[in-house]
Amino acid sequence: MTTSVVLAVTVGALFACGIYLMLSRNLIRVLLGFLLAGHAVNLLLLSNSDGAAPIVGEPSNGEPMADPVPQALILTAIVISLAVTTFLLAMAYRNYKVTEEPEIGDDTEDVELEDASPGAGDE
C-alpha cells in the first residue's frame, strides 16, 4: 500500500514537472520536460504489472507471473523517447546556430497578423 502511494506521488510529480518544463520557450527545458513525462509514463506502466518477473523462472510460493506486455511497452517507449530526444536535441542545436538564442522567439508573421486585425482575438 505504501509503495503504491509513493509510486503514484512520484508519477504525479514527474508529470507535473514535465508539463511545466514543456510549457517553456527554452528548447532545453522542453527537452527535459519531455524526458520527465516519458519517465512518468514508464513508471505508470510499470506500476500496473503485478507478480514475479517471467525472466527469473518459476515463481515461488504460488506467486503469479507478471504480464510481459507492460514491460514490452516500456522497452518500446524507451527506444521511441531516445529517438525523439535526439530529434529535439537536433532542433535545439539548429535553433541555436540560426538565432544564437536558446529560446524560441515570437513569430513575426503571427505578430503582423495580430496587429493587422485589431479586435480579432478579443472575443
Image (tube, grey):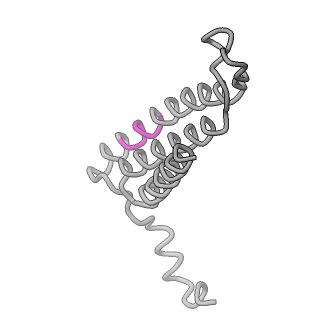
Give the residue furthest to the front.
61
Q: Is residue 114 above or below residue 9?
A: below
Q: Nearer the viewer, residue 20 or 8?
A: 8
Residue at 34% of width from left, 40% of height from top? Answer: 93
Q: Residue at x 41, y 56 (%)?
A: 21
**Measured along the vertical axis of the image, is residue 59 above or below residue 9?**
above
* Image side of residue 109 versus residue 55, left or right: left
Q: Which residues are magenta?
A: 87-92
Residue 25 on the magenta span: no
| Rendering coords of residue 115 (x, y %) | 49, 82
Which residue occupies 52% across, 43% down? 3
- Let me know if residue 90 is in the magenta part: yes
Please tell me which residue lies in front, 119 or 56: 56
Q: Judge whether 78 appears above or below 104 on screen.
A: above
For the C terminus, the quadrant is bottom right
Q: Residue at x 68, y 18 (%)?
A: 61
In the depicted view, which residue is nearer to us: 50 or 89? Answer: 50
- Does residue 74 appear left or right of residue 99 in this picture? right
User: Which residue is most to the left?
Assistant: 100
Q: Position of residue 70 (x, y in %)?
A: 67, 30
Asked whether 95 or 88 is in front, the reply is 88
Whole-percent x, y for residue 109 in the image? 49, 67
Q: What is the total number of numbered labels drawn onto the structure image?
A: 0
Q: Is residue 73 above or below residue 26?
A: above
Q: What x and y, as percent, mark residue 22?
A: 46, 55
Report the predominant secondary structure element of the magenta stretch: helix
